[in-house]
Image: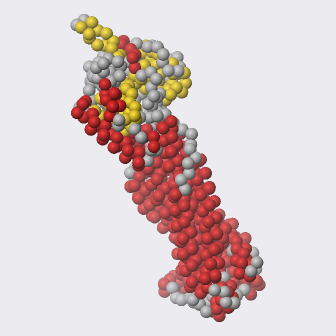
Amino acid sequence: MNAFLLTVFRSIKTNFSKLISIIFIMLLGIAFVAGLGTLSPMIQTSFGQELRRENVPDLILKSSSSTGFADDDGNGTPDIVQDLLDSRIVSSAEGLTTLDSSMFESMDVDLGLPEDFPLTRFYGIPEDMTIGPISVVEGRMPSRSDEICVERTRSDMIVYEIGDTIDLGSVLGTKTVVGIVSNPLNFSRYQELDMVHQEEIEQIIYLRKQDFVIPTTIVPGVIVNVPLPTTDLYVTLRGSTQYDFFTGEYKSFAEDGKAQVEEYLADRYGEIYVLTLEENMSYAYIVNYTGKIDIIALLFPIFFILVAALVVSTTMTRMVEEERSIVGCYRTLGVPDSRIKLKYLLLSLICGIFALVVGLIVGLYSLPMVIYPAFETTFFTPPMQRLMDPTFGLVSGFLMILIVLFVTYRVVRKFLKTTPAELLQPLAPKAGKKIFFERLPLWKILPFRYKSTIRNLFRYKKNFIMTVLSVCGSTALVFCGFAIIDVANSLPEIDYPGLTNTIVPIAIVIIVFALFLSIFVIYNLTNLNIDERKREIATLKVIGYHNKEVVLYIYREIMIMAGIGIVTGLPIGILLMYVILTLLDFGTIGAILPQTYFITLGLALFFVFLTDALLMKKILKVDMSTSLKSVD
C-alpha cells in the first residue's frame, strides 16, 4: 500500500472521534428529515390502497329534488343510471338512499319517530352493492324487513351490540340490530355532520333499500308504505384505477370527470349536485392532516440541516487545521495539490455517505413505525404500507454533504496557498487585544479567572459564534416541539377533530431529535475546544491550578456561550412557531403555556451540564509534559 493511502488511514485513526461525531450529527438530521418526509406519502398510500380495494366511488351524485332520481320504468333502477353508462364517462353507477332524520320534516314525511329520537343518518342500501360496499365487522347484513345494521362506533355515537332493538317509529317499526358494519367512505372516527342543522350525527343505521319506506297516499283514504326514492348515486369514472387516490393527478382527473358529468346531465335532469372525494369528510381529514405533516417536514429540516451543517463544517475546518504540518510535508515531498485536496474531500465524503445510508434506514423504518399508530385514535387505519419515499432524506443528505465538501475544499485550498515552510511551523496563536469590557470600571475589580474567560470569548470569535448559533438552533427546535403540543392541546375539537392525537407524537419526535442534536453539538464543540487548548490546560496545571479550577476555566466559557445560545434560541423558537402556526392555519402563540419556556430552558441547561460532565475526564487526563512539548 503506498505511503499516501497509509496517511489517509492514519488520519482516520487519529481523528476517529471527530469523524464519528460528524457522522452522528449528519445521521441525526438525515434520519429526522427522511422519517417525517416519508410519513405523509406512506399514510396516503396506506389509505389509498384500502379505498381502492373497497372500490369507493369517484363521484357521488345527489338529487336536488325531494322525489329523488326518477324510475319511469319501475324496475328499481333510476333512468339516470343507464344514461350515465351510455355517456361512456363512467364505468359503473349504483343508486342508494341516504337521508338524515332532520330532513323528513322538510320533505313533509312523518315516520312517527319517537319524540326524543337521536339525530340519525339512514342508509337504504341495495342488495349486492359493488361500489363502496358496506363491510360486516361483526354479525351479518340484514336479510329481513325487521333487521338493520349499525355503523361501528365513532367518537361519541351511541353504542349498540348485536341483538339490541331500536324503535324507528310507527312506520318503520322496531328493528333488531344483526350487524356492526363499516362504510368505506366513513373511515374517520369522528362524527359526520347532519346535512340540515350541521350538528353531529348520533347514530348511523343501514336498512335494505326496499325496507326504507314512507307512507304515501294512493287514493284518498288509502295510505300505503312505499320505498323511498334513490337519493344518491355512487359513480366510478372510466380510467380511475390508474391513479392513486391522494395524488394531484387523481384530483385533477376527478374534477375533469365531475365537469363532464355535470355538463352531460345538465340538459337532461336539471340541477344535480356532483361531489368528488374531496367533499368526503374522512378523505378531507386525511388530506388536511397529511398536509400539515408536510409543512412540518419541510420547515424543521431546514433548522436541522443548518445546525448540523454548521457543526460539521466547524469540525472539518479544525481537523484540517490540526494537520497543517502534514499538508506541509505533502507539499515538501512534491505531492500534487489535487491529491492533497482529494484526501480531505474523501474523508468528508466517506462520513457523508455513511451518514446518508444509515440515516435513511433509521429514519424511513423507525419514525413511521412510531407515528403511524397515533392515527388509530383519529381514523380506522388500514395496515401500514411499507412504502418508503426517501426524497426528503436524499435531498437533505446531499445538501449537507455538498456543504461539508465545499467547506473542506475552501479550508484545504487556503492552506495550499501557504508555503510549505510556513505550514511546517505551528500556527501562531491569535494576538491578544484590548476588548470593550476592559474600558469599564468594573473590569479592575474582576478576579483574574473571569477576566481570562471574557478575553477568551472575544479571542476565539469563531468558536463563540459557532457554539452560540448551534445551541440557539437546538433550543429553538426543542421549544417548538413543546409549543406544538401546547397549541394542539388547546385546539377546539369540533374544528380540528383528532388533530391533537396525530400531531403530538410528531412534536415528541421533534423534541427527542432536537435534544440528541443538542447533546452532539455541545459534545462536539466542547471536545474540539479541549483538543485545541491542551497546551493552555497543561500550563494551568503546571502553575498550580487544581483540577476543579482547570475544569471551571474551560467550562465557564462553554456555559456562557451555551447560555447565550439558549436565551437567543427562545425568541428564534417563538418566531419559528409563528411561521409554523401561520402555515398550518391553526392555533396561536398565546396558547403556549408559560411553563414551556422554563421547561425548554431547564432541559437545554441540563443537557449542557450532562455533556460537559461526560468530557470532564478528558480535561483531567491532559498530560502536562506531553502537551507542553507538542508544537501544535
Q: Residue furthest top?
A: 221
Kindly identify the residue that appears in the image at 69 percent across and 90 percent down. Answer: 333
Colour pattern: secondary structure
Q: Considering depth in this image, is 224 or 592 the residue closer to the camera?
A: 224
Q: Considering depth in this image, is 240 or 189 the residue closer to the camera?
A: 240
Residue 104: quarter of image: top left
Report x, y in % for residue 537.
69, 80
Quadrant that contains the C terminus? bottom right
Kindly identify the residue that appears in the image at 61 percent across and 67 percent down. Answer: 352
Q: How many marks?
A: 0
Q: Considering depth in this image, is 127 or 529 the residue closer to the camera?
A: 127
Vertical arrangement, residue 388 with respect to residue 631, above or below:
above
Kindly identify the residue that appears in the image at 67 percent across and 77 percent down. Answer: 531
Report x, y in % for residue 288.
42, 46
Quadrant that contains the N terminus? bottom right
Q: For this view, does 508 lie left or right of residue 621?
A: left
Q: Considering depth in this image, is 67 or 359 the residue closer to the camera?
A: 67
One can see residue 235 in this view: yes
Q: For this view, does 366 lie left or right of residue 540?
A: left
Report x, y in % for residue 395.
52, 62
Kindly identify the residue that appears in the image at 66 percent across and 72 percent down. Answer: 18
Report x, y in % for residue 421.
65, 94
One can see residue 492 in this view: no
